[in-house]
Structures are given as C-alpha cells and as structure tokens.
Image (cartoon, rainbow, N blue to C red):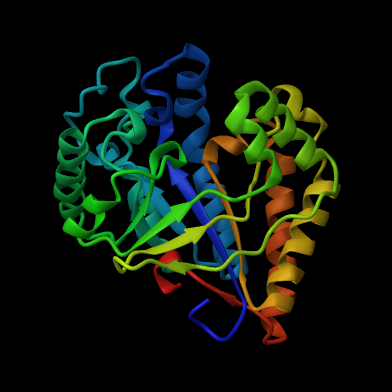
Amino acid sequence: MNSQKPSFSISIDLELAWGVWDRINSKYLSNAIKLEREIVVKLLNIFNTHQIPVTWAIVAALIDPKNKMINIGDKKAWYAPDIIENIINSKINHLVASHSYAHPNFKETTENIIEEDFEKAEFYFKTIGISPNVLVFPRNQVAHLSILKKFNYKFYRSIDKSWYKEIYKFNAFLGKIANINDKIFPFKTNSVKSIIHNNGLVEIPSSILLISRNGLKFAVTNLNMFYKIKKGIEMAIKNNECFHIWFHPSNFYFKSTKQLDLLIKILMFVNEKRNKGLIDIKLLDQH
C-alpha cells in the first residue's frame, strides 16, 4: 500500500435493477423496488453510527430521468436520485465512484459503445456536481482500460484472487458451489495491496464479497463469515496491507437482519483496531 498503515475499505455497487437489465425477472424487480431504499438507509445509519466512510459505486443511469429502462415496470427500479441524495447528504463523507452509465457487459461490448457509456456517465454525474476518478467495472469485468485515462479515472477495483475463482474459470456452476463452500467453511481470505500500473492506473483488488443468503447460500453462517473476515483484517494488520469488502445492497435482500448484524460486528472489530492506531479506514481514491 502507499500508506504506511494497514487499511480497511468497503465498496458498494449501487445499481438496483440495472445489474440485471439484460436478464430481467419480476422477483428481482420487485425486490429492488420494495427493499433497496430501506436497506441503503439502514446501511447509511450503520456507517454514521460507527464513523465508517465507504465508496459507493453508482450506475449513472439512476440519475437519468429519461433512461432507456424507465418504463419497464416501476421506474423506482431504474431511477433513484433520492437514494443518491441520501448518500451525498450523509453525515459521513462517502465517496461516489462510477459503476458505468448503464452497466454494460465490458468484455462483450465494443470500445466505441463503452466510450459512449463513459460519456453519458460523465454527463449525468456532472449534473449532481460529481466527477468520479474511481471506476468499479460492471460484473467485475476489467476491460477497455485505455478508456479510463481518457476520462480522468485513476483508480479501479478488481476482483479478489480467491481459490474458487480458478474453479469458476473452468466451470461457472462449480465455481458458484466453490464460492459457497468458501463462505461456509473458515478458509482463509486475503488481505490485498494496491497495484500501480505503468500507465498510472491504480488497481485495488477486493478481499471478499459479503455474500447474499438466498438459495444454497442459506448455509453460510455469520459465525464463519465473521471468523474469515476477522482473520483477514488481522492479516492486513500483520502484513501492512488492506482488507477490502465489497457488496451490493441486494446482498441484504434475504435475511437482512442477519446480514446487517454481521456488518455491525465487522465494523465494531475494525473500530477496536482503529482506536488502537492499528488500522485506517480508506476510500478507494485514498489507496
């Protein structure tokens, strides 16, 4: 890390239904409409209580009142200036990063179309007085890096290098099962270092996804998740690195109380270490 002190970071992908715009289902739309706003308010209150600033990676189409999806079901799934206003006006100074304009599939989209997406994101972020220099790639598909410099981005998030990712490369289904097993059993997780590339871009890997609890993931327990994360934070302190958690508000749609309780427990542990001068809280543009 560039800093001398170990660090802890949280990044949150705020996308509502844009995360599934190309494979819409009624259940997800319903959850995005009914649950997302309440969850974001609860998250903001928790961050206020524990004095933890985080990075919110926002899909810019959420502030475009004429976006292409506005008439698909309830517009609250596609348009959310109220949520973004709450984030910006929070007592804690959070960072707004870009999660693109319309959450395109970067690896399957041409450079020209991606550049158009960047242009639209830049326009709509400027309407709320923001010029992000951090990008969180949709679906964590790191691609078209040359465009980042053109639009004055300096930082980007990359995905963690956990063992189950190697399985996912060969078989997506088995990779998902491996991911669940990684969260069920107390396998170690990673602390990370930012990587400064020759082109000047700073890559910030993640350590762990705060996984949702629906479907087969019901077997994931707070006990094991906290153990993994606690060990990861201790590893970051020992190695003078960063522990970086990421998630979507949608990861709290199921068993919300359990998920929020886990987050609170993590933040209390981080604050124990911060109060002892052992770790700093960092936004992604501070790496």
Q: Quadrant of residue 78?
A: top left
Nearest the eye: 227 or 113:
113
Residue 74 lies, in percent from the top left, at 35, 19
Residue appearing at x 70%, y 44% in the figure: 163
Vertical arrangement, residue 205 with respect to residue 285, above or below: above
Q: Quadrant of the C terminus?
A: bottom left
Count numbered badges in the picture.
Answer: 0
Q: Quadrant of residue 193?
A: bottom right
Residue appearing at x 22%, y 50% in the figure: 147
Residue 141 lies, in percent from the top left, at 42, 40
Residue 178 lies, in percent from the top left, at 73, 33
Residue 173 lies, in percent from the top left, at 65, 21
Residue appearing at x 29%, y 65% in the figure: 199
Nearest the eye: 184 or 131:
184
Vertical arrangement, residue 219 with respect to residue 90, above or below: above
Residue appearing at x 60%, y 25% in the figure: 172
Nearest the eye: 89 or 243:
243
From the viewer's perspective, tell me whether residue 258 is left or right of residue 26.
Answer: right
From the viewer's perspective, tell me whether residue 136 is left or right of residue 239.
Answer: left
Can residue 192 be seen from the camera position used here? Answer: yes
